[in-house]
Image (cartoon, rainbow, N blue to C red):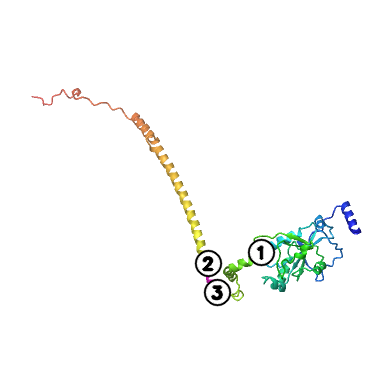
Amino acid sequence: MVNRRRHGSRAHSHPRRNPPPAQTLRQPAVFAKASGSDSDVPHDKLTLAQARRGTPAHRPVRVYADGIFDLFHSGHARALMQAKNLFPNTRLIVGVCNDELTHKYKGYTVMTEAERYEALIHCRYVDEVVRNAPWTLTPEFLKKHRIDFVAHDDIPYTSAGSDDVYKHIKAAGMFVATQRTEGISTSDLITRIVRDYDVYVRRNLQRGYTARELNVGFINEKKYRLQNQVDKMKETVRTVEEKSKHLVHRVEEKSHDLIFKWEEKSREFIGNFLELFGPDGAWHMIQERSGRVLQALSPYQSPRSSPSSSPTRGRSCSPPSY
């Protein structure tokens, strides 16, 4: 009690120091020791109100979140992010169940326990990973790892003969709810693979996996490889069609452009022709002017004489008489 009062008085007289920067941003999280936490900091029980107000830097709120974390995905990461941000100063401990427990109570996993452990220590929100975590949390486990609160979604988790494995945690006031991410789960991912099994088998055959590695029989292997060849031919034909359409489109654009330019030049040519050779064109004006010039330069022609005025008219055409 005295110690808590002293800490409280110092908290009022001095501004609270921020906790040191998280090491998980620069290096993987650590694995918890099998013996539990070895911190020498006194671990007094915290209420939810105290945890939300904030704790000294050397006394983070130890929040525990457990799960299988098979095919680690964004739904897992978002749940851990929420758990990490429940309180101003949080140390997030994540428990991962081993293969034996998981296969017994939930079913087979895609990833091994070692792979699942490794995935968790590389999540930025995780400070510590507990391997071989228990399926049901016991008081001894909570005490050994100095756990203040347990974070999980609020939906009752029915398993191992219990209608809710977190029921006793909720009753003790140590449960803090997080929200599930809709639309993604490990079961959903596995369902996609099972539903499109042929697609993924063909994909891996293309990537160099053998039929034996994929557990595919001889006949099915030939069928899948034939389908891959057919798809490749379809893709080639589709590519050629797309290129042909593009070429035809470019030719049409060029032809339209040429026709437009030809029509424009034709109109220009016809306009120039009419301007030059039309009724009122320059050519007729030139001809008219040249005709006038020629007429002006030509000699004057006198009119023809009449027959009565001819000087030979009065002469006799008969010969003279002797």
Against 4, residue 306 (above or below) is above
> Going by the picture, which residue comes out furthest to the right?
2
The answer to which of 226 and 75 lies nearer the viewer is 75
Residue 273 got which mark? none
Q: Earlier in the sequence, mark 3 or mark 2?
A: 3
Residue type beneath disc 1: Ser
Residue 224: within the magenta?
A: yes
Q: Closer to the observer: label 3 or label 2?
A: 3
**Residue 59 sits above or below residue 254 on the image:** below
On the question of residue 168 being in view, the answer is yes
Numbered label attached to residue 220: 3
Question: Quick one: label 2 or label 1, which is nearer the N terminus?
Answer: 1
Specify the quadrant of the image occupied by residue 299.
top left
Does residue 209 appear to the left or right of 237 in the view shown?
A: right
Q: Nearer the viewer, mark 3 or mark 1?
A: 1
Q: CA distance from mark 3 to mark 2?
A: 16 Å
Mark number displayed over residue 231: 2
Identity of the amino acid at label 2?
Asp
The residue to which callout 1 is attached is 185
Residue closest to the far left: 322
What span is in magenta? 219-227
Q: Quadrant of residue 90?
A: bottom right
Mark sitting earlier along the chain (3/1) = 1
Q: Residues within 10 Å of mark 2 (few under 14, many from 20)?
A: few
Task: In this rendered view, identify the residue nearer to me: 21 or 73.
Answer: 73
